[in-house]
Amino acid sequence: MTQPNILLIMADQLAPQFTGAYGHPVVKTPHLDALAARGARFDAAYCNSPLCAPSRFSFMSGQRISRIGAYDNAAEFPSAVPTFAHYLKLQGYRTCLSGKMHFVGPDQLHGFEERVTTDVYPSDFAWTPDWTKPEERIDKWYHNMWTVKESGTAVSTYQLDYDDEVEYAARRKLVDWARDRVGVGGEPFCMVASFIHPHDPYVARAKYWDLYKDEEIDLPALEMAPEELDPFARRVADGIEASVTPLTREEIIAARRAYFANVSYFDEKIGALVQVLEETGQLENTVIIVTADHGDMLGERGLWYKMNFFEHSVRVPLVIAGPGILPRPVPNACSLVDLLPTMLDLGGERPTLGQPIDGVSLMPLARGEASDHDAAIAEYCAEMTGHPVFMIRRGPWKYIHCDSDPAQLYNVVEDPMEVTNLAGDPAHAERVAAFAEEVAETWDAADLRQKVIASQQTRFAVNAAMEAGAVAHWDYNPPSDASQQYVRNHMDWTVAAAKYRYPPVEETS
């Protein structure tokens, strides 16, 4: 098979449990549903860290966050770390990023040839947590329950403005490539379109809000008081102030309704991009991948947002559709680090890898072939903890370890809401011991903790200096030269018109 184009569409904070494609009876996601119907739907896909920037750096590099120092939302993503964008360029792909990737540091491309929008969050070190003060909130940017309480509708928000721009820029680039024969009989392309919805705040346009009614919004299935939570979850609850901020039933319904609405809004973005592929004749030779950086608890256990290893936080949707993909649900556990080798397999002969990767190609599973890959590993080294937290999902089992907390073991197939912690059950003592040994062999938790703290202290010093004087911002400014756009005095307007028209008018003799 010739090299297919790749369109990767990423949501922010989208839990698969809240999509029609994964069985939610209310949430409307017709475009994702259609892709899942003709593609491979991975039912046990996980992020490698339940927080935006670490998850994305891991996804881009195919490496765990502890390998590349991607600890939190203000950790620098080093330029020397190869990404799938670097490797795809070596395979002959044209590459472009439209939207969010939360790159931190002066390198805002990380292998992409082009980036057609800015990012939506800061690219500096201002959001660095402090593990020497694990109980201290950073009120400037930590979540709290006001984000839930303000849920509702709006004509526009910064998130809506941003995602509308991301869609427009991605559509425009796909058409530009078609004009230049990229992806249509020419060199293949990889477009990454990365949206911020349905990430909180839970504020939606009325068009999408009106798709739902209050009475059909399901409430969280598992209610827990703060004192019933495990220590890690309790720290998260305290950090986001959920443990001290009561919510009314109406507030919870409003937040979930707005989230559902924004899932439908994101789904419409999927449809818009697929439509461009259809209109430019590129759908049949394009592999479409839809995923997210992490999920959202959305009130389960009394928790909101992410930053923990429960299913609603750490699981992500993953649908792969296109030529050579067998339509079917895939039960095997996998994670975002697997997407780098998956895309390289789509590209043909792999280039030499600049660094070892932690992922395994999902193409055998996507093609319906036998594969023994059935594992996902995740790490958390950000706020609301003072020690690294690790997760291993293998088969039906999920094991969670932190040096400062009791171990957790769940059978997520039989107990999908993770109600029963089996770590203290004598019947599972051997399994718990094996997982504990695997953690000890995989990570030096004490050494990693010292690396995290050292990284934080370094970034505090640099950030203080950046804020003390004149600032050279790292935030990305997409290049634009208006003198070369549309019709200008140095151009022949008939030539410009012919260039922009797609499909072109055939010449007649």
Image: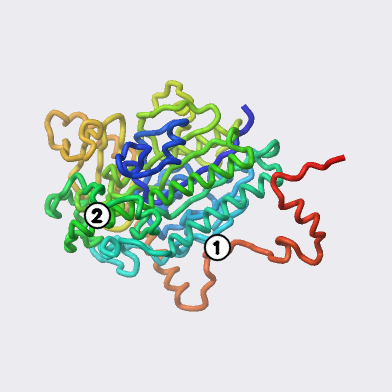
Observer able to see residue 446:
no
Q: Earlier in the sequence, mark 2 or mark 1?
A: 2
Tell me which colouring the rendered structure shows: rainbow
Horizontally, is 440 left or right of 21 in the view?
A: left
Q: Residues within 10 Å of mark 1 (few under 14, many from 20)?
A: some
Residue 162 versus residue 287 in the image, above or below? below
Residue 251 versus residue 186 in the image, above or below? below
State the image coordinates of residue 219 (x, y, percent, origin top left): 21, 49
Horizontally, is 250 left or right of 359 in the view?
A: left
State the image coordinates of residue 227 (x, y, percent, origin top left): 12, 53
* Marker disc for residue 476: 1
Give amino acid for label 2: Ile
Observer able to see residue 35:
yes
Please say if the residues under marks 2 and 1 sit with CB atoms less than 8 Å apart.
no
State the image coordinates of residue 158 (x, y, percent, origin top left): 44, 64
* Marker disc for residue 253: 2
Residue furthest to the right:
509
Indicate the quadrant containing the N terminus: top left, top right, bottom left or bottom right: top right
Residue furthest to the top:
370
Residue 66 versus residue 437 in the image, above or below? below
Q: Residue at x 29, y 60 (%)?
A: 131
Question: Which quadrant holds residue 459?
Answer: bottom left
Between the C-alphas of marks 2 and 1, the distance is: 37 Å
Q: Residue at x 16, y 35 (%)?
A: 422
Say which element carries label 2. Answer: helix
Q: Say how many tags the image has.
A: 2
State the image coordinates of residue 229 (x, y, percent, origin top left): 16, 50
Residue 346 versus residue 369 in the image, above or below? below
Horizontally, is 164 left or right of 19 in the view?
A: right
